[in-house]
Image: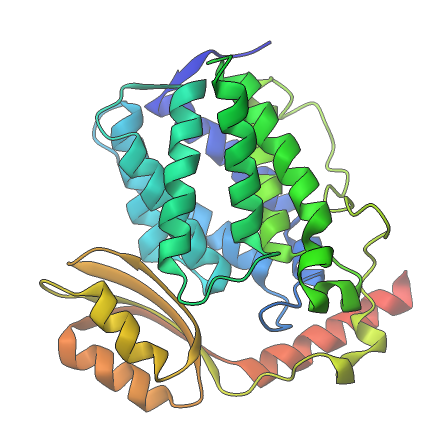
Amino acid sequence: MGADSVDGKKLQEMFASATDWLEKGASEINAINVFPIPDGDTGTNMVLTMRSALEEARRALGQSASSVAKSLARGALMGARGNSGVILAKFWQGIARALNGKDYVNGKDFARALATALQTAYQGVANPVEGTILTVLKDASRGAEETAKEDDNLVSVLEAAVRSARESVARTPSLLPVLRQAGVVDAGGQGLYVLLDGALRFLKGEANNLEYRRPYLVAPESELLPRVAQMPVELERPEGYCINFALEGQRLNLKKIEKALKRKGNSLILSGDESLVRIHIHSSNLGDVLGYAARIGVLHHIVITNMMDQYKEFIEMQRKKSATD
């Protein structure tokens, strides 16, 4: 059936293959990205975040699962892009914490790691919303834990996680009205499902044998062809900037930073520790956000996007897609 467990090298290879699988579907994941804003970049941001994580993992000292997971977490933190990317960084932070000191990862280890990743991800989002990547991670974690009670084979546990993630993605429109309105599933949740599915395909030896077959088509009552092009006035038009940066400092207080930034914008997500924090926020007051951060530390990897520009590009992308379908 597959591997009972993997070491760090195999863990890296597994998610390198999963990232390749995710990249094949990135443009279609972008096309269903309507929450928290319709900006059409979720798939791309998740791929870029994973590429950064893998680049760091290639420099990992040692081949233990623990050392590779820590490197993946640091790389994801430094290269996190957008809302979904910072949540992925939180995901890897939790995985690394759970695998600390472990040379190998079996099914029970992976189930525990997903549970820790879930807890870490929810803690990093200022205002968690159900029907998103967080819900899909929660359901994947539960599926993995149920199977791990009886079977510690990694493939068996990952199969349960993927199956639960797929079913969870299909339910996202029933949990989040904007998704139901647009006729799509959640893009971030879909991205996580595809990533886990790619990891499973690698373990089962199927990574190079199957063609990409639009795995985002999972909703029970929809072909998921986005109707956004026909309904732009019904989607929220974003204002201000999507701001992403890493903040380096000493004895950084994440709760204090979160409290201060909550007053300066929305869609706030933080990931990191007292020496390095990755921040994602939507705000109309660019100077206020960056000025506050600069007073408490040093800023790195600053990426700022005008969200109205992203919105216009997304609507145009949908119009072109609608014309060719």
Q: Is 116 or 296 nearer to us in this picture?
A: 116
Image position, residue 309 (x, y; %): 59, 83
Location of residue 143 (image quadrant): top right
- Residue at 71%, 79% in the rendered image: 235
Name the residue furthest left: 250
Q: How is the image coloured?
A: rainbow
Residue 39 showing in the rendered view: yes
Quadrant showing the N terminus: top right
Image position, residue 151 (x, y; %): 50, 12
**In the figure, 34 relative to 173: above or below?**
below
**In the figure, 305 relative to 69: above or below?**
below
Q: How many marks?
A: 0
In the image, is 234 to the left or to the right of 206? right
Image position, residue 259 (x, y; %): 28, 75
Q: Is 176 or 84 nearer to us in this picture?
A: 176
- Residue at 42%, 20% in the rendered image: 108
**In the figure, 116 relative to 242: above or below?**
above
Image position, residue 211 (x, y; %): 74, 32
Residue 55 showing in the rendered view: no
Q: Is 40 or 182 nearer to us in this picture?
A: 182
- Residue at 43%, 44% in the rendered image: 118
Location of residue 131 (image quadrant): bottom right
- Residue at 68%, 53% in the rendered image: 172
Quadrant showing the C terminus: bottom right
In the image, is 322 to the left or to the right of 267? right
In the image, is 2 to the left or to the right of 302? right
